[in-house]
Amino acid sequence: MTSERTRQRLVQRLQESGISNPMVLAAVAATPRHIFVDEALAHRAYEDTALPIGRGQTISQPFIVARMTELMLDAGPVKKVLEIGTGCGYQTAVLSQLVDEIYTIERIGALQDQAKERLQSMGVEGVYFRHGDGFQGWKEHAPFDAIIVTAAPMAVPQALFDQLAEGGRMIIPVGQHSGVQDLMLVEKRNGQKQVAMMDKVRFVPLQAGPVE
């Protein structure tokens, strides 16, 4: 279930679902999703579905990872990205093939330690980790060309928007934690928010404050 053929079947399903950016499809094809899930779930790693990774968190559905990444790249090449919610590191691994630098924040220390080990074992470079509060972003390294948020707040955090470069893009799920949320594309134009609703999605809630 971890063969090249299995990965290519996943990529074919993503294409059938509307993902068309060849760089995104190639990055998904090159990323061994099975190493980012528990061994007991490895046989399901290339299904187009979210899976539990422990601590009440999930590895996102491959379509959503590809969709958010494609939206990020739609306006052209991106060099520096802020990722809110490292999780198991799968989205980080996909992004690392497409951008120069990733600054990734995770509030659950144990998850980030695991993600760091996995990414280092893959030889991934250009990723900087912070155990902290995603609502606050990473001001010291702002501005960012793009921000990808992999958990849902009730509204777009102002601190994150402030750290977005002029002309930059934030892809973020926003809405109630008990149901469907809106995947928003937020662009900064002349310092103002331009917001477009892209998809209906389901994400775990974005929570404040780091924990071990």
Image (cartoon, rainbow, N blue to C red):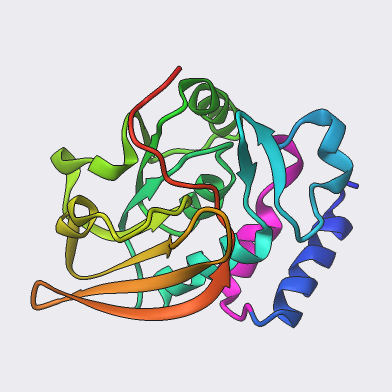
Q: Nearer the viewer, residue 64 or 16?
A: 64
Predominant SS of the magenta segment: helix
* Residue extending furthest toward the left: 190
Q: Nearer the viewer, residue 46 or 49?
A: 49
Does residue 137 show up? no
Q: Using the image, determine if residue 173 lies above or below residue 185.
A: above
Residue 77 sits in quarter? bottom left
Residue 7 sits in quarter? bottom right
Does residue 168 show up? yes
Could you tell me which residue is drawn at 18 percent across and 50 percent down? 159
> In the rendering, at what x and y percent does residue 161 appear?
21, 60
Q: Nearer the viewer, residue 118 or 88?
A: 88
The C terminus is located in which quarter?
top left
Q: Tell me, yes or no, whether the highlighted magenta stretch contains residue 26.
A: yes
Q: How many marks?
A: 0
> In the rendering, at what x and y percent does residue 136 appear?
23, 41
Could you tell me which residue is drawn at 54 percent across and 27 percent down? 111
> Left or right of 15: which side holds 165?
left
- Bounds of the magenta span? 19-36
Q: Nearer the viewer, residue 37 or 94?
A: 37
Q: Using the image, determine if residue 200 lies above or below residue 45.
A: below
Could you tell me which residue is drawn at 56 percent across and 73 percent down? 200
Q: Tell me, yes or no, whether the highlighted magenta stretch contains residue 118.
A: no
Could you tell me which residue is drawn at 63 percent across and 43 percent down? 58
> In the rendering, at what x and y percent does residue 81 appear?
33, 53
> Left or right of 197: which side holds 82?
left
> Left or right of 28: which side holds 7?
right
> In the rendering, at what x and y percent does residue 92 appear?
50, 46
Residue 179 sits in quarter? bottom right
